[in-house]
């Protein structure tokens, strides 16, 4: 875990503002040194089948295209995933299509002359060349297969095990050569994970696990070992680089997985690879960013220019689409990277850099609202689970998929305009946050249950939704709420009835709970918000009617949602159900329960969930002021999806006269719209100031400046 650091008075001003507003901002992020904010990740993987490489590369043209597109840093290739080097390495193999040319050296020289910072890319555990020549380094699956493709398959990626000391030493030797030749600003290690599944059955791993008295078939044991090997590589590479080139930054890809707090001491930064149309989706970066932000590690969000994923030659986003994606990344306090890949010729596509330039130019326009900004949180999603799980991309093990609950809760909180972090159990003080949302399906350890109980005793509040078959009475806060027993309803779907607590104007209707619910019995100390209804029978081959489920027949009176002001509890997986089914009822129930435990939110707007609000704090022009920056990002420009095509946001649908309420006990000294470069109108409404934004095209930044004088 990155510890709380000692700050100067000048650095404290945004943190004081955050505290005054009743939200949390991480001191380590406030104290982090400035970093480049507009990066190109220039992929360049080439097999010998492509023939000549970089034969159209021209250093002057290359540098001009980057500077014209407002690029301030770039990732250039030393060694690709096929195992080929792009400079005259003594280790080899150098890509044969280079014909002895030092492409990396030429690119670095061109970038340095243009004032562009350089990171050098190096692929680690995925290396086809080494995998073919060092079978003793291969990872093996539990089916006793390596990750090498069959001889009749098109070659794909491979997996080498970090348990092999000679392999690790070779990578460090390569690193030494790169650093001594080029002294880059940073090095960018790709694929440092042992393998995609987080487990390995090579002889080294089997022997080590058995010697420790553990079962190598236990996925928890495997993940613990994978974490140990990964952490060993992170430590070894960081220490190695610090000796050779002190101050060289190190990026290690793919770190947004559980166990991040243990790896944090060896990470300068976390770059979050998340090409939304390339399989990651639009929910991946926001959830992952909040996990990294909660750990206090500087971070960068990486999208791509591609319509799909890497090497999608001919795939190019529209300027408005890429502008929207980069604005959403910057809104969370992140630096921004855009992935590109030229063809083997090494020539950058002018059309690509026109689109990149539009996105980066838009970011540069609001640069003074981004420099030194730190995201704030008034809530946190609490997660606990399998080591190295990727919360934003649920995995499957033995046919069982890990819960999507963190991803789902993040979607609901974002649509409710709540500012939040994601924290792993046991890694951060819970009392940073007024409210905790406990991720559905998280089986909390006894230690974590104790910590949450202490948090509640100290005045904290929680929202806890459970799956139908969860052991709800295990949790003392639910027992204190009045719960005495829980069992799954035998009906799926079941139904929910809002009765008197329903949103104004809604009918007293039995809404379907498509993923079922629990039957909760108890003597309730709080308000029952919604109750359970059930059908007459469960649909089956022997007992059915019409096209789908039997309608509701019995209103049981058992609670589906109940709260006492400090604890809100829901007897079905409301977030996951909303994520799967998109039923508006689940979002409204979640919002209703959230209002019970977080009645006063930092930000509110009536503009709906398609308008995202993200808040950061930042030092003002002098040490006597600080700003709250509210990023308003307009996701209204989507399209109807067919079952096959990607989700994307291409059309600009401007929003006009958007009111944003900012909770504040004091009046601001100034309110500006940074994108529009105008002073904004505002008025006081109860405990908030209401700011009217005349128009939001793709994004706008509301800067609310406060005095921080005592």
Image (cartoon, rainbow, N blue to C red):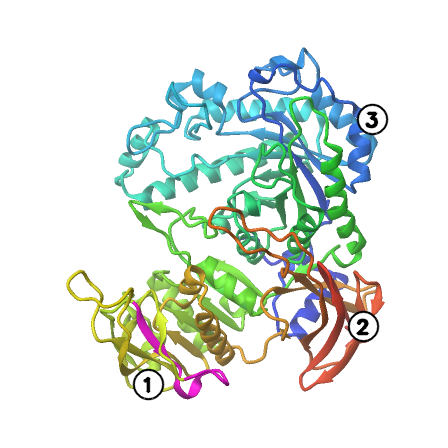
The image shows residue 278 at horizontal and vertical percentages of: 54, 42
In reply to whether residue 505 is colored magenta, the answer given is yes
Question: Callout 1: helix, strand or loop?
Answer: loop
Q: Which residue matches tag 3?
A: 60
Residue at image mark 1: 524
Residue 239, x across and y down, in percent? 58, 35
The residue sitting at the left extreme is 542
Give the magenta range: 493-507
Q: Position of residue 409 (x, y in %)?
A: 47, 63
Query: What's the distance in space between the residues labelled 2 and 1, CA to CA?
Result: 48 Å
Which quarter of the picture shows residue 678?
bottom right
On the question of residue 424 being in view, the answer is: no
Label 1 neighbour load within 10 Å: few <14, some 14-19, many 20+: some
Q: Which residue lies under the disc numbered 2? A: 680
Residue at 25 percent across and 69 percent down: it is 491
Q: Please give left or right for residue 477 compared with residue 600 in the image.
A: left
Element under disc 3:
helix
Instruction: State the mark number for residue 602.
Output: none
């Amino acid at each position: 875990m990155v510890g709380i650091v000692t700050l100067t008075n000048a650095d404290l001003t945004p943190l004081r503002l955050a505290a005054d507003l009743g939200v949390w901002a991480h001191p380590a992020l406030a104290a982090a040194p400035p970093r480049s904010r507009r990066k190109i990740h220039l992929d360049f993987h080439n097999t010998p089948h492509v023939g000549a490489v970089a034969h159209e590369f021209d250093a002057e043209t290359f540098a001009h295209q980057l500077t014209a597109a407002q690029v301030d840093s770039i990732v250039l290739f030393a060694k690709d995933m096929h195992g080929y080097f792009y400079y005259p390495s003594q280790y080899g193999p150098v890509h044969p299509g280079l014909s002895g040319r030092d492409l990396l050296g030429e690119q670095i020289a061109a970038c340095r002359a243009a004032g562009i910072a350089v990171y050098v890319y190096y692929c680690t555990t995925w290396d086809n060349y080494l995998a073919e020549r060092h079978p003793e380094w291969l990872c093996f699956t539990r089916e006793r297969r390596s990750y090498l493709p069959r001889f009749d398959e098109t070659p794909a990626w491979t997996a080498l095990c970090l348990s092999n000391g000679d392999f690790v030493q070779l990578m460090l030797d390569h690193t030494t050569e790169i650093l001594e030749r080029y002294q880059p600003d940073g090095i960018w290690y790709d694929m440092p994970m042992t393998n995609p599944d987080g487990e390995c059955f090579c002889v080294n791993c089997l022997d080590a696990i058995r010697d420790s008295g553990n079962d190598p078939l236990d996925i928890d044991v495997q993940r613990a070992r994978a974490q140990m090997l990964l952490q060993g590589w992170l430590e070894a590479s960081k220490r190695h680089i610090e000796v050779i080139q002190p101050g060289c930054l190190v990026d290690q890809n793919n770190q947004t997985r559980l166990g991040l707090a243990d790896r944090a001491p060896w990470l300068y930064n976390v770059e979050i690879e998340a090409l939304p149309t390339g399989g990651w989706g639009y929910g991946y970066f926001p959830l992952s960013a909040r996990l990294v932000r909660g750990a206090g590690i500087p971070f960068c969000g990486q999208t791509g220019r591609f319509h799909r994923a890497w090497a999608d030659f001919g795939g190019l986003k529209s300027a408005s689409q890429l502008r929207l994606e980069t604005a959403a990344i910057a809104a969370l306090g992140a630096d921004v990277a855009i992935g590109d890949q030229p063809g083997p010729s090494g020539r950058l596509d002018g059309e690509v850099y026109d689109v990149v330039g539009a996105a980066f130019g838009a970011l540069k326009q609001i640069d003074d609202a981004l420099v030194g900004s730190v995201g704030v949180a008034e809530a946190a999603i609490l997660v606990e689970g399998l080591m190295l799980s990727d919360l934003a991309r649920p995995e499957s093990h033995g046919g069982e998929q890990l819960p999507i609950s963190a991803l789902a809760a993040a979607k609901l909180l974002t649509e409710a305009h709540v500012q939040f972090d994601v924290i792993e159990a046991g890694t951060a003080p819970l009392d940073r946050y007024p409210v905790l949302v406990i991720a559905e399906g998280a089986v909390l350890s006894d230690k974590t249950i104790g910590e949450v109980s202490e948090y509640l005793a100290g005045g904290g509040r929680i929202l806890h939704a459970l799956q139908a078959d969860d052991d709800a009475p295990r949790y003392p806060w639910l027992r204190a709420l009045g719960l005495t027993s829980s069992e799954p309803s035998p009906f799926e779907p079941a139904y929910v009835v809002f009765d008197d607590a329903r949103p104004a104007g809604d009918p007293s209707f039995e809404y379907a709970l498509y993923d079922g619910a629990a039957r909760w019995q108890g003597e309730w100390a709080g308000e029952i918000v919604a109750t359970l209804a059930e059908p007459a029978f469960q649909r089956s081959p022997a007992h059915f009617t019409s096209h789908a489920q039997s309608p509701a027949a019995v209103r049981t009176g058992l609670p589906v949602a109940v709260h006492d002001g400090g604890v809100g509890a829901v007897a079905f997986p409301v977030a996951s159900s909303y994520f799967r089914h998109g039923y508006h009822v689940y979002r409204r129930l979640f919002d209703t329960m959230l209002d019970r435990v977080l009645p006063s939110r930092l930000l509110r707007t009536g503009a709906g969930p398609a308008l995202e609000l993200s808040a950061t704090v930042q030092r003002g022009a002098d040490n006597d002021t600080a700003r709250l920056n509210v990023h308003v990002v307009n996701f209204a420009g989507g399209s109807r999806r067919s079952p096959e095509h990607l989700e994307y946001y291409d059309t600009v649908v401007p929003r006009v006269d958007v009111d944003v309420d900012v909770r504040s006990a004091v009046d601001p000294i100034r309110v500006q719209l940074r994108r529009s470069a105008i002073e904004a109108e505002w008025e006081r409404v109860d405990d908030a100031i209401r700011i009217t934004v005349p128009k939001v095209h793709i994004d706008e930044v509301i800067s609310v400046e406060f005095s921080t004088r005592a």
